[in-house]
C-alpha cells in the first residue's frame, strides 16, 4: 500500500467531494478516483458510498481515516528522527545574526560546506542575542554576530568591518555634504533597520548620547527597503554601507561613526573546536 495515497483519501474524506478534493491535491478527478478505487481494492471493502450529495464514508472508511491519520503521524515521527540523526552526523552548524548574510561571502561558505560534509549552515537570520545563546548552549557550533561579545565562555574573531553611513536622496539638503555629524539627523525623518538588528539599538544609543531621540518613521527588515524608501524621498536612511552611490541615492560618511563589525564566535570548550578552526582557516584563505 502506497502511504502517500493516505493524503488523497483523507482529503476526499474531509471534502466529501471528488472534484474539490482533486483541486486541493492538484490532481484530475479521474486520477484521484483511480487512487481511491485502488485503496478500496487493497482493503477489500468500499470506503465511500457514491451518492448525488457526494461521497459518504462507510463505517470502514471512518475507521480507515482515523487509522491512516495515526499512521501518518507515526511516519512523520520516524522521518523526523532520521533527519535528527542525519543532522547530528553533520553536527557542526553555523548560525547567522540578522544582516550578516548580506555582508558575508556566502559563496565561500557554500563552497566550504560542499567540500566538508560535517559543516552545515542554517540559512536563517536570527537576532544577535539568539545566535549568541545558540552558541553558548551548543545548539550551533559557530555563529556570525554583530559586535564583539564580552561573554567569558566565548572566543571571537573579527570577520569584517563596514562603515555606517547616512543615505540621502538627490533633492535633500545634505546631498552635497562630504561628511556629517550624527546631530544632522536630529530633526530628520529617519529610516532604520528594525529591532531585530543590532544597528537599530546602536543608533538609538548613539543619538541619546548626543542629547536627542531619533525620529524613526520606518523600521525595515532588509537593506533594499531602506534604499527604496530613501529613493522615494520618504526619509533618509542610516545603515551599513551595503549599496553603491548612484544618481538618486548616495551614502554620506558620519563623523566619528562606529563601524558595523561582524565577528565569528564559538565556545572556548566547543566539542568541534578542530572543525571550527578548520572552517575559519579555509574562510580566511578563500577571502584573500
Image (tube, helix red, strand yellow):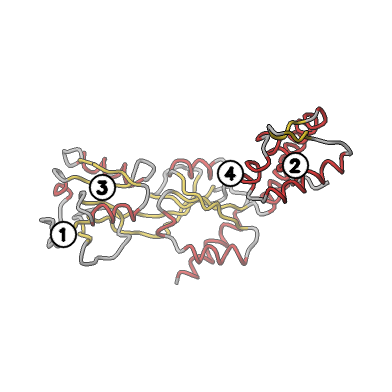
Q: Give how far apart the Cα atoms at labels 2 and 3 are.
A: 50 Å
Q: Residue lying farthest front?
A: 52
Foreground label between 1 and 3: 3
| Secondary structure under the numbered disc 3 in the rendered image | strand
Q: Look at 83% across and 41% down and name the residue there.
A: 40
Judge whether 71 appears above or below 27 on screen: above
Residue beneath disc 3? 191
Residue 79: give x, y in percent of width and height. 72, 45
The residue nearer to you, when weighing 207 against 13, is 13
Residue 12: give x, y in percent of width and height. 70, 38
Position of residue 223 in the picture relative to residue 249 (left or right): right
Residue beneath disc 1? 179
How many numbered marks, from 0 up? 4
Q: Tell me which numbered mark, 1 or 3, is placed earlier along the sequence.
A: 1
Q: Residue lying farthest left?
A: 173
Q: Residue lying farthest right?
A: 44
Foreground label between 3 and 4: 3
Residue beneath disc 4? 139
Judge whether 113 appears above or below 21 on screen: below
Q: Tell me which numbered mark, 3 or 4, is placed earlier along the sequence.
A: 4
Q: Look at 34% across and 54% down and name the residue there.
A: 223
Q: Do the residues labelled 2 and 4 touch (CB within 8 Å)?
A: no
Residue beneath disc 2? 6
Q: Give how far apart the Cα atoms at labels 2 and 4 are.
A: 35 Å
Q: Are marks 1 and 3 in contact (CB under 8 Å)?
A: no
Amino acid at each position: 500500500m502506497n502511504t502517500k495515497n493516505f493524503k488523497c483519501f483523507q482529503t476526499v474524506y474531509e471534502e466529501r467531494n471528488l472534484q474539490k478534493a482533486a483541486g486541493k491535491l492538484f490532481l484530475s478527478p479521474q486520477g484521484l478516483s483511480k487512487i481511491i478505487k485502488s485503496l478500496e481494492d487493497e482493503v477489500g471493502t468500499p470506503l465511500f458510498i457514491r451518492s448525488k450529495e457526494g461521497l459518504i464514508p462507510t463505517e470502514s472508511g471512518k475507521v480507515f481515516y482515523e487509522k491512516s491519520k495515526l499512521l501518518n503521524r507515526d511516519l512523520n515521527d520516524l522521518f523526523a528522527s532520521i533527519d535528527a540523526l542525519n543532522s547530528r552526523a553533520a553536527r557542526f552548524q553555523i548560525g547567522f545574526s540578522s544582516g550578516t548574510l548580506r555582508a558575508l561571502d556566502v559563496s565561500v561558505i557554500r563552497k566550504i560546506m560542499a567540500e566538508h560534509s560535517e559543516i552545515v549552515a542554517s540559512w536563517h537570520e536570527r537576532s544577535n542575542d539568539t545566535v549568541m545563546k545558540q552558541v553558548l548552549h551548543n545548539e550551533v557550533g559557530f555563529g556570525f554576530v554583530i559586535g564583539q561579545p564580552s561573554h567569558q565562555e566565548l572566543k571571537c574573531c573579527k570577520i569584517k568591518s563596514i562603515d555606517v553611513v547616512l543615505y540621502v536622496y538627490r533633492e535633500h539638503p545634505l546631498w552635497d555634504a562630504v561628511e556629517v555629524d550624527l546631530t544632522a539627523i536630529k530633526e530628520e525623518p529617519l529610516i532604520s533597520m528594525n529591532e531585530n538588528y543590532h544597528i537599530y539599538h546602536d543608533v538609538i544609543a548613539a543619538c541619546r548620547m548626543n542629547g536627542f531621540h531619533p525620529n524613526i518613521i520606518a523600521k525595515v527588515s532588509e537593506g533594499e527597503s531602506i534604499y527604496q524608501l530613501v529613493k522615494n524621498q520618504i526619509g533618509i536612511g542610516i545603515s551599513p554601507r551595503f549599496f553603491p552611490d548612484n544618481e538618486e541615492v548616495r551614502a554620506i560618511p558620519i563623523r566619528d561613526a562606529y563601524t558595523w563589525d561582524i565577528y565569528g564566535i564559538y565556545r572556548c570548550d566547543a566539542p568541534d573546536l578542530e572543525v571550527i578552526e578548520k572552517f575559519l582557516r579555509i574562510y580566511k584563505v578563500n577571502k584573500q
